[in-house]
């Protein structure tokens, strides 16, 4: 190959490597930008999730407070019973019992849902919280983990692609030397440059499609 | 030089320039990679910091919600039933008392805080809320907060390194431009371009090495240190100072620059009464970078208690010189001068304090706002501190007294005591006047009140007026006393605006007992005011010291003390 033709060939290669380097930088920037977007989306889901959980916690404990009052009156009604008392006292206790149970019924019908009371009489706070969470998840995206996983993956992609730019830069360096050298080493330089350029192209594919 | 030589020289220069450009391109790529790497570290750390901040806040809110239920939902109900038992027993209704006892057990079963880990229902005491809060959320929330702070620090440092790499890339781009321009020039000037460009590249190389060293030495999130610290915070909150100190020691062993661990260890030593170790740790925390108002405040206060007055003055000045609106520190400064016998500077500080308080109240009122409640809080605390100093000077320290020991108080003690009392009265009057009228107390004549007479009402006539009063000349009442009545006799003008009664129990005002009156008392010269629970059969006054103060038109006209004996 004549010297001028070789120089022209290498110049074309330098131009290609430069364009590929710019393409790599563009892809890396895009991946980095997308990672930022995923982080924002993930943080929005995390905030939504925490907000939903806090609101549910407030309501659940509000209901549990009502359940406590309910228990107080229900149990008081149960205790207002003395088989050994005289008739007057029995009637008085009966009246008080009716009143206590009435208040208990009023509380359960207005301030919390009776189906969270387990058969043993305890209040299933966790069940209420989990049901409320399930209801929230039907209408809102509260799962932030996939967003953050995707962001991490995109960051790895971006780092890889930026690292790949070093390969193109070294390829560019060898091709430049091949262009300025006059002895036969210029062919070795060109070959190294081409091989590194090919490695860089492979790197683009790996970074873009496999990571 | 012949044309041929010139051409060869130009070609050689071009080749050198091209080589340099290609080499710098590699450097740019490497720097870009490092920039991207550090930016990713920063982004991930900042995101984790945000997550932890969110988690910490949520954990605190959960804790507050749960604690609110435990205290006011469960314990309040339990306590109400407990009081019903007392009332039933007082009335002789043993059957009702028994019913309530069984009901109380049912309620206790609903709350972990009323379980045996935190509460002894047979003892006459509250649940151990500190332990419950610590176990339920405080340690976890502290841990998350610390993780947030550590991650944010990692993000900040990595972000700064990343920014430095961006600067280096920019400079390398400048050097590339200089190399490129040099190929268009002739003569020696082109070498100047190469020289400057190469100088910039050299600087960038040095910068890169430096930034890489910083990257390697960047802060890390030390979970063992954070875990120990968080547990220490929980133990300190429960008043378990020795165990907390051991945890803070472990945290500092893991991370010697852990400023908050040093600060909290100082607080644990303070709680133990080891003031010198507390001062050492507060100073260590400052050296490690914790330099906010709180640490100065606590350090200066501890230095005051330890009798290191000059240090305390310097510490207070560090904050007051830039922010004179911090009333609490201003009061501590006055107190410090007072304890060292420097009455001139003490008076100056108290003058500045009153001026600043008046300014804050006027500013708030001018903007149709109420002054911050912290104003009263800190000024009240200032009067308590003065009373503590007086008690110490009287060689009559109470269990709650916080003041330098008597041997540390220097100067003429009689003058200090007199001055402290004057300032305390002045402060107390200013607080009442600012709170109720929005201005400082007037200098007009007010009524003179004879020393209070304590006793109990023995007879009330048909109109409800008191017709019988039994004086207790010692002002010492047996345990179980439900109420104590103050008889006061005055001369001079009756109050024009208002009368305020304050009752202090063991050094702290019981605000539920505060009375504010605007009634005309000019129809008589002797009146009565009862403090206590004579309207119910459930409560009695607790044993201890009760100080009664009477303010007429915001002026303190009399104060007296009575005691309830121990059981």
Image (cartoon, rainbow, N blue to C red):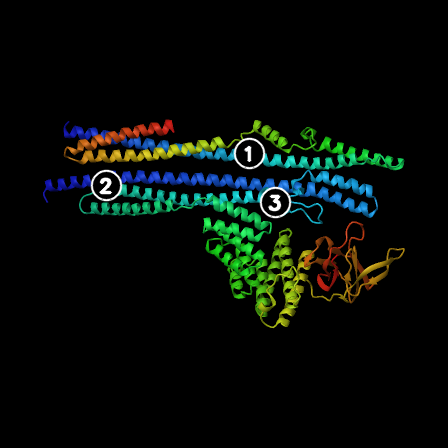
The structure residue drawn at horizontal position 65% and vertical position 67%, both measured from the top left corner, is B395
Q: Which of B343 and B433 is in front in this view?
A: B343
Identify the disc placed on residue B350. Answer: none
Q: What element carries label 3?
A: helix
- Does residue B327 appear left or right of residue B35 in this picture? right
Residue B332 vertical position relative to residue B109 in the rendered view, above or below: below
Q: What element carries label 1?
A: helix
The quadrant of the image that shows the C terminus of chain B is: bottom right
Residue reaching furthest front?
Answer: A84
Residue B331 vertical position relative to residue B12 in the rendered view, above or below: below
Q: Position of residue B244 (x, y in %)?
A: 55, 51
Q: Do labels 2 and 1 share a chain?
A: no
State which chain disc 3 sits on.
Answer: B
Q: Position of residue A211 (x, y in %)?
A: 38, 29
Please give the residue where the numbered disc 3 appears in the rendered image: B133
Q: Position of residue B550 (x, y in %)?
A: 74, 61
């Amino acid at each position: 190959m004549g010297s001028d033709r070789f120089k022209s060939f290498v110049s074309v290669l330098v131009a290609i490597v430069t364009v590929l380097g710019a393409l790599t930088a563009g892809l890396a920037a895009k991946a980095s930008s997308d990672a930022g977007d995923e982080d924002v989306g993930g943080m929005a889901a995390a905030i939504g999730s925490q907000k939903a959980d806090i609101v549910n916690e407030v309501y659940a404990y509000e209901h549990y407070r009502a359940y406590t009052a309910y228990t107080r009156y229900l149990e008081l009604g149960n205790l207002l019973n003395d088989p050994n008392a005289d008739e007057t006292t029995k009637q008085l206790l009966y009246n008080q019992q009716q009143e206590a149970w009435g208040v208990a019924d009023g509380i359960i019908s207005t301030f919390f849902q009776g189906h969270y009371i387990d058969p043993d009489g305890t209040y299933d706070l966790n069940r209420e919280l989990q049901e409320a969470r399930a209801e929230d998840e039907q209408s809102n995206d509260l799962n932030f983990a996939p967003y953050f996983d995707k962001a991490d993956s995109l960051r790895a992609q971006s780092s890889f692609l930026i690292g790949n730019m070093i390969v193109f830069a070294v390829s560019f360096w060898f091709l430049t030397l091949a262009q300025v050298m006059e002895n036969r080493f210029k062919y070795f330089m060109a070959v190294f440059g081409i091989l590194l350029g090919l490695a860089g192209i492979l790197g683009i594919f790996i970074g873009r499609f496999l990571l | 030089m012949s044309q041929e030589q010139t051409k060869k020289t130009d070609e050689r220069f071009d080749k050198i320039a091209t080589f340099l450009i290609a080499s710098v391109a590699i450097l740019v790529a490497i720097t870009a990679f490092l920039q991207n790497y550090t930016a990713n570290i920063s982004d991930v750390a900042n995101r984790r910091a945000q997550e932890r901040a969110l988690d910490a806040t949520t954990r605190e809110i959960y804790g507050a919600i749960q604690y609110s239920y435990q205290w006011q939902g469960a314990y309040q109900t339990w306590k109400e039933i407990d009081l019903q038992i007392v009332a039933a027993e007082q009335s002789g209704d043993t059957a009702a008392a028994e019913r309530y006892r069984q009901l109380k057990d049912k309620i206790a079963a609903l709350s972990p805080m009323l379980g045996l880990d935190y509460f002894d229902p047979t003892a006459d005491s509250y649940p151990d809320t500190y332990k419950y809060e610590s176990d339920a959320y405080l340690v976890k929330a502290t841990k998350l907060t610390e993780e947030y702070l550590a991650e944010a620090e990692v993000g900040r440092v990595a972000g700064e390194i990343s920014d430095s790499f961006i600067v280096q890339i920019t400079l390398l781009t400048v050097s590339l431009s200089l190399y490129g321009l040099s190929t268009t020039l002739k003569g020696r000037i082109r070498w100047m371009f190469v020289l400057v460009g190469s100088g910039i590249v050299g600087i960038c190389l040095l910068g890169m090495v430096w930034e890489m060293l910083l990257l390697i030495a960047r802060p890390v999130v030390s979970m063992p240190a954070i875990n120990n610290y968080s547990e220490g915070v929980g133990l300190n909150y429960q008043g378990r100072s020795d165990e907390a100190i051991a945890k803070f020691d472990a945290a500092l062993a893991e991370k010697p620059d852990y400023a908050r661990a040093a600060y909290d260890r100082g607080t644990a030593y303070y709680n133990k009464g080891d003031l010198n170790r507390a001062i050492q740790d507060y100073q260590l925390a400052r050296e490690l970078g914790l330099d906010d108002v709180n640490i100065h405040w606590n350090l200066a206060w501890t230095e005051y208690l330890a009798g290191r007055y000059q240090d305390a003055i310097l510490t207070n000045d560090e904050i007051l010189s830039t922010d004179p609106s911090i009333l609490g520190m201003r009061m501590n400064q006055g107190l410090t001068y007072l304890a060292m016998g420097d009455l001139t500077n003490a008076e100056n500080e108290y003058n500045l304090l009153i001026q600043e308080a008046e300014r804050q109240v006027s500013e708030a009122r001018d903007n149709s706002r109420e002054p911050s409640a912290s104003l009263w809080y800190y000024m009240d605390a200032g009067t308590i501190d003065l009373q503590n100093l007086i008690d110490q000077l009287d060689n009559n320290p109470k269990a709650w007294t916080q003041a330098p020991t008597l041997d540390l108080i220097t100067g003429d003690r009689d003058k200090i005591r007199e001055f402290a009392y004057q300032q305390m009265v002045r402060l107390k009057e200013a607080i009442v006047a600012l709170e109720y009228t929005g201005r400082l107390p007037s200098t007009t004549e007010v009524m003179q009140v004879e020393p209070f007479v304590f006793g109990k009402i023995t007879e009330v006539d048909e109109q409800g007026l008191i017709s019988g009063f039994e004086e207790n000349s010692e002002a010492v009442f047996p345990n179980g006393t439900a109420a104590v009545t103050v008889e006061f006799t005055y001369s001079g003008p009756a109050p024009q605006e208002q009368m305020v009664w304050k009752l202090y129990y063991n050094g702290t005002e019981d605000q539920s007992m505060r009375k504010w009156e605007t009634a005309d008392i000019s129809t008589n010269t002797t009146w009565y005011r009862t403090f206590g629970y004579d309207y119910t059969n459930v409560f009695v006054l607790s044993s201890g010291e009760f100080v009664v103060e009477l303010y007429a038109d915001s002026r303190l006209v009399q104060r007296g003390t009575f005691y309830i004996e121990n059981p």
